[in-house]
Amino acid sequence: TGRILQVQQSGGFVRFAFNAEPNKCVALTESGDAVVVRACTVASALWIPERGRDGTSCIFRNQLSLYLSGHDSGSPFHLVNKNATNDWFQQFTNPGISCPVM
């Protein structure tokens, strides 16, 4: 259950809270250069949803304009430029939230 996330909408942002500890979220380090687990109350736990390239999924941008990305292998998330290659996955399917076209 530690890797199962709850997507929580907050205005035009979303938070990714951990099911096992709902007060902990996917956020950035204080320097903003890495993805870590932090309190859901920090500003870097807020992500901006955008429509994915396929027209149905969502991608999530932080406030520094980098995107939540992973290798789809259970490894930690990273921050990567939009539409990155080299096996970076950025599109998340989540019918429970609205992802605006940017």
Image (cartoon, rainbow, N blue to C red):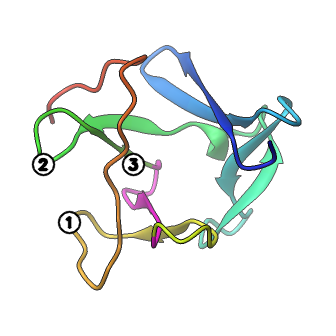
Q: Residues at badges 2 and 1 in contact (C-beta under 8 Å)?
A: yes
Looking at the image, tell me whether mark 2 or mark 3 is earlier in sequence order.
2
Q: Residue at x 67, y 51 (%)?
A: 27
Location of the N terminus by quadrant is: top right
Marks 3 and 1 sit apart, C-alpha to C-alpha, by: 12 Å
Amino acid bearing label 2: Arg
Residue 102 image point, x, y percent: 15, 36
21 part of magenta stretch: no
Give me the C-alpha separation between circle 2 and circle 3: 14 Å
The x, y position of residue 41, in whole percent, is 78, 32
Q: Where 82 sits versus 23, above or below? A: below
Q: Position of 21 compared to 41: left or right?
A: right
* Image disc number at residue 61: 3
Secondary structure under the numbered disc 3 in the rendered image = strand
Residue type for callout 3: Arg
Q: Which residues are magenta?
A: 62-71
Q: Please say if 79 is above or below 2.
A: below
The residue identified by callout 2 is: 53
